[in-house]
Amino acid sequence: MNFQPYAVSQSQMIGTYVPEQILRGKVLDILPDRTAIVQLGARKSIARVTALQPPLKIGGDYLFQIKQADSHPPTAVVVGHRNELQQEKSSPLSMVRDLLDAFQLKDTPANRGLAKIFLDSGEPLSRSQLVSAESLAGSTAGVSDSLRAVGWLVNRHLPLTKPFFNTAVQLMQQKSLTGQLSSLQKEIAASSLSTPSMLAVNQSISDLEKTDGFPDPVMTAGLIGREQSAQLLRDFFQNSVPAFHDDSNAMAEFINSSMSVPDAANLLNKLAVRMQPDQFLSRYHQLLLAQPAIQTLLQTANGRTPIGILFKTLEALGFNEEHSLRNQLSIDGTVQATGSLKERLLALSDDVHAPAGVRQLAGEALGKITGQQLQMVSSDPLIAQFSFQVPVPIQNKVKNLSVYWEGRRDKQGKLDPDSCVILLHLELTHLHETLITVNVQNRRISVNVQNETADLQTLLKDTEPELRDQLSALNYHLLSVHQTQKINRRLAEKAQQPLAVSNYNLDLRI
């Protein structure tokens, strides 16, 4: 399943240097003709630096203001440069004040905090950006939450606009999505009014506790592997329609799609296969489910398939909403209802006939889902580092699950499940607080269950062979499963904390 971050165009995420921007940089080397190699955040740039009195020092931190962005290399001047002794005594605060002086902005707590955010990120900053950020964060001293939201948007290269800012602030609210949906359902039940949009949302929330994890075609293909699924697709057509037009690109496109009926129709058209799309999807899905790796997973389900509950819940919430709509538009230009909770919350929040309190709660829940999608946006296309909270069904009850993911993306920008760190935080009825850490390195998995109230050693030992077999069927190797009878509070907070700042470290030891 392609869980897309909130729709943000690449041009919004990648900045370019423009005149008057100021950046903080470290001089790595001095070159001839007044050029220098400068470290700007995670990037190294060559710049022609004017006004070299006093001379730049290798290893020194400076503020550089762009004067000619289109020159090669770009031309910059040093902002607020002092003599050599003063440079050595300069502090981050003096650098912030130099920046505010250069932009002719007031030295307020909010402006100082915002300036520091940009300087620490290594991102180019213009006066208009700082003014826009100030209007979002306010101008008083008590703006720590607002500054944090702005800092997170800057860290993720997201636009500093009111909708994005409001979504980030809303995501910082203590109440989980599970709690928000529970409050919304109670408000709907207590209301004397009942509109179609209210009934639809109420039904979606009730259906969450019935979510089954039986893998759909996309999930099944992901478990088997894209390459093997593509080969099975070719085998399917060779056995069913020997005269089909063998188009590898079309089949690869289908395997990486949401495998909807329009996707299937598009594939069949390109392969010149006369078959009903829904019939093809059903038969191909059955072929995938018949594979030994999938059968191994399904045999131990005891009437309920837990393998895909998290993913099916994310789908029901609408985490793939934008991807689904974009896919529909790219195929035939029409949009059909997905039935996701996000889609229904949007309709309810816009329903003028619904009570104001219900609409407000619907808007807050909608903002939480959108904010969690935003967290999947990364400043680096090869890095994935985000957290989210979802209501998942456990023993016929909906519980809040906090998930933190840290790892790489593949060349297509998708999450790489072969090398990552996953944290799962749960509040359970009998086991109470439980933190599960999963460390995956080159398809080798170590699992640590942290719980302070129950001895799980016997249970883990008894279930380890089954888990090992299931992972082996998917070409993963289980190294160890053990319990720690003390919860690592730093990791638990990481799983629960929204607006995680991207500071990727794949070799995190657990």
Image: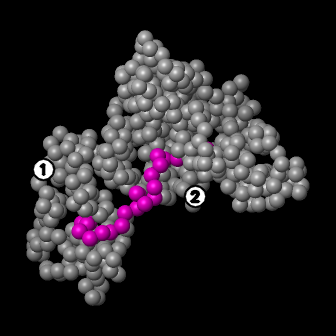
Q: Residue at x 37, y 63 (%)?
A: 15
Q: Residue at x 40, y 31 (%)?
A: 363
The quarter in which the N terminus is drawn is: top right
Q: Residue at x 30, y 69 (%)?
A: 18
Please tell me which of labels 2 and 1 falls first in the chain: 1
The image quadrant of residue 200 is top right
Secondary-structure class at tag 1: loop
Residue 395 on image: x %, y %:
58, 21
| Nearer to us in this view, 228 or 149 | 149
| Nearer to us in this view, 382 or 57 | 382
Which residue lies under the disc numbered 1? 108
| Nearer to us in this view, 290 or 167 | 167
Mark 2 near mark 1, Cβ–Cβ under 8 Å? Answer: no
Chain part drawn in magenta: 1-23
Q: Is residue 321 above or below residue 34?
A: above
Q: Is residue 187 above or below residue 27?
A: above
| Nearer to us in this view, 181 or 395 | 181
Residue 242: mark: none
Instruction: Give the Cα separation between the discs numbered 2 and 1.
Output: 44 Å
Residue 412: mark: 2
